[in-house]
Amino acid sequence: MKRVIFYIDGFNFYYGLRDKCKESREWKAFYWLDFVAFSKQFVADEQELVKVKYFTAAPLNVGKRSRQAALLSANKLLNPAVFEIIRGKYYSKNTSCHLCKGVFQTFEEKRTDVNISIHMLLDCFHNSVDKLVLITADSDLITTVQTIKTHFPEKEIKIYFPPKRTSYELFDVCKPVVYLENNKKKFENAVMNNVVTDGIKKYTKPPEWK
């Protein structure tokens, strides 16, 4: 049976979904998503979903960090053996405005691209996977995709674009791609209950996402 691992660029996925919500508010329900249930819908009968690896960093904003923590904890509670969280980090930096010449603080997520690349390559090296599904539209990962295609030609690799996200460069090296915003029904099927609990731990869908 072909082993499948999903690699989700959480930053790219979240902001793509957020942009889709501006276009259609009903997509807001999909913030509260069971990523394993979502991924399984793309796995064929002769395949086995062995891992869903979610790459992200804890936001510095307290409210955003709390909502993200609830989402990831609920996913881990539902699928402890399959769902894995790999964390990067947010850093603050000062940026100059070329118009007003003022200096203001912005935030940048770091390590995610490197973490994704390392995990994909190591999974191939250790023969832990037969099919890799990368959910991102970040063209920085082109080199990783090309490296796997060159050095692990027996591995199948697919690119899924998050809603409202695309990359012509990734498309060129790994076509055909899957556009997730064309799979609304799969999103609907994977929305978690408002309260996720095992009788001991309990995680509630943030009111901002209802």
Image: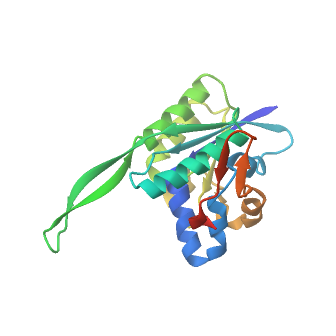
Residue at image coords 13%, 69%: 101
Q: Where is residue 48 in the image (x, y as percent from the top left)?
A: 79, 36
Along the horizontal axis of the image, is 147 left or right of 206?
A: left
Residue at the image point whose x is 44% and y is 38% from the top: 114
Placement of the N terminus among the 4 image quadrants: top right
x, y percent for residue 140: 43, 48
Q: Looking at the image, what colour scheme do you see?
A: rainbow
Between 207 and 89, the one lying in front of the other is: 207
Residue most extreme to the top: 126
Relative to 165, say whether 109 is above or below: above
Quadrant housing residue 88:
top left
Quick one: quadrant of the C terminus?
bottom right
**Closer to the camera in the image, 77 or 103:** 77
Residue 132 seen in this snapshot? no
- Is the residue 190 above or below the residue 111 in the image? below
Q: Which residue lies furthest to the front in this view?
A: 200
Q: Is residue 201 visible?
A: yes
What residue is rendered at 65% in x and 40% in y? 76
Q: Which of 81 and 71 is in front in this view?
A: 71
Q: Where is residue 31 in the image (x, y as percent from the top left)?
A: 62, 60
Give residue 143's position: percent from left, percent from top. 46, 42
**Most distant residue in the left direction:** 101
**Front in this rendered view, residue 46 or 52:** 52
Compared with 95, 117 (above or below) is above
State left or right for residue 64 relative to residue 193: left
